Amino acid sequence: MSDPRITSSIFTRGAVDLSALRGTPEPSRPTAPSQAGPPAGVPGGPPAGGGVAVIDVTEATFQSEVLERSLTTPVVVDFWAEWCEPCKQLSPVLERLAAEGEGAWVLARVDVDANPRLAQMFRVQGIPMVYAVVGGQPIDAFSGVVPEAQLRQWIQAILKAGGVTVAEPEDPRLTEADDALMSGDLEAAEAAYRKILAESPADSAAEAGLAQVGVARRVAGADPRAALAAAEQAPDDIEAQLLAADIEVLSGLAEQAYARLVGLVRRTAGDDREKVRQHLVSLFTIAGPDDPAVAAARRALASALF
């Protein structure tokens, strides 16, 4: 699968010759998917809420249902076949995401056995093969089954290319991980966050959640008042200061925690300084890089280090 950013390569304008389709006679354009039901083994249909989300297209309807529709709404074309087992894994996910999109994009399914000329025009060598069509032209594609997280990112990039702004649906994997964290099941929470990061390495929410698991483990069993008092009495005790910073972060006093550890960085050197720096950076992860307090603390940290 390509990078979620829109790529060019063979998918640039003119690489797929669709000119023959533009002269193909076609029946009147339907306003909704056929009521005959989806092909065997490939469930799908319109979203419960209304607009068209999933349609079956043929060579005769491709111009209106894909090319013309893509002038206003991004269209994702899924090349599949009833005998294709990987298709039965990917197609239901695509259909569910299309329904979630509530008309922001349309999934067009093409049976390659019934429409071999379309498959040839799109240079389909194996299935499942998925193309994104925006403005009447294919702009990106991937083949095979991909994880849902990557599929969501790809679709978001396609929507952005088509000028569509939609809210990112809540990730059920993240909800499950957050619920485990809030209930105190740190092992389950860590496993869930790590699974998300294995599929989506740049997921900032999962990174923040994993950092929170670390803080929760470090403060487990500690008396907050006693820990803060101990840190006050021993300003150069590294372990006491780190624990106090963790407690402050969990208490909503993140800026105070950052200042505490930046000050400790100034007073330490060598391995001790590096230990404090890494701990501080892990606390930054919880808030995220866009937090103004994190940005200010990073500048203070840079000043303390250099």
Image (cartoon, grey):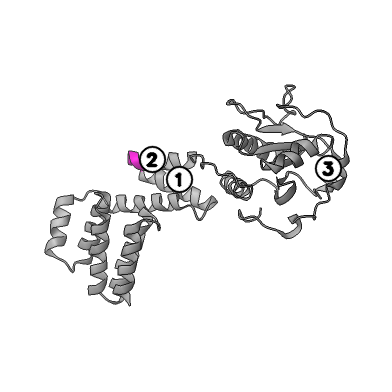
Query: From mark 2 to mark 3, how far is it between C-alphas?
Result: 47 Å
Q: Identify residue type, mark 1.
A: Ala
Query: From this viewpoint, is residue 172 visible?
Result: yes
The residue closer to the viewer here, 97 or 19, is: 19
Question: Does the segment drawn in magenta span residue 76?
Answer: no
* Residue with the mark numbered 3: 118
The nearer-to-camera label among 2 and 3 is 3
Apparent side of residue 10 relative to residue 96 in the rendered image (left or right): right
Label 2 or label 1, whichever comes before in sequence order: 2
Is residue 117 among what the camera can see?
no
Query: Of the residues shown, which amino acid type is indicated by label 3?
Result: Leu
Disc assigned to residue 192: 1
Residue 142 vs residue 63: left or right? left
* Spatial CA span between label 2 and label 1: 9 Å
- Which portion, as a residue range, is magenta? 179-185
Q: Tell me what residue is drawn at x 39 percent, y 55 percent.
A: 288
Q: Mark 2 points at which residue?
A: 180
Q: Residue furthest top?
A: 35
Q: How crowded is mark 3: few (under 14 residues within 10 Å), some or many (20 or more)?
A: many
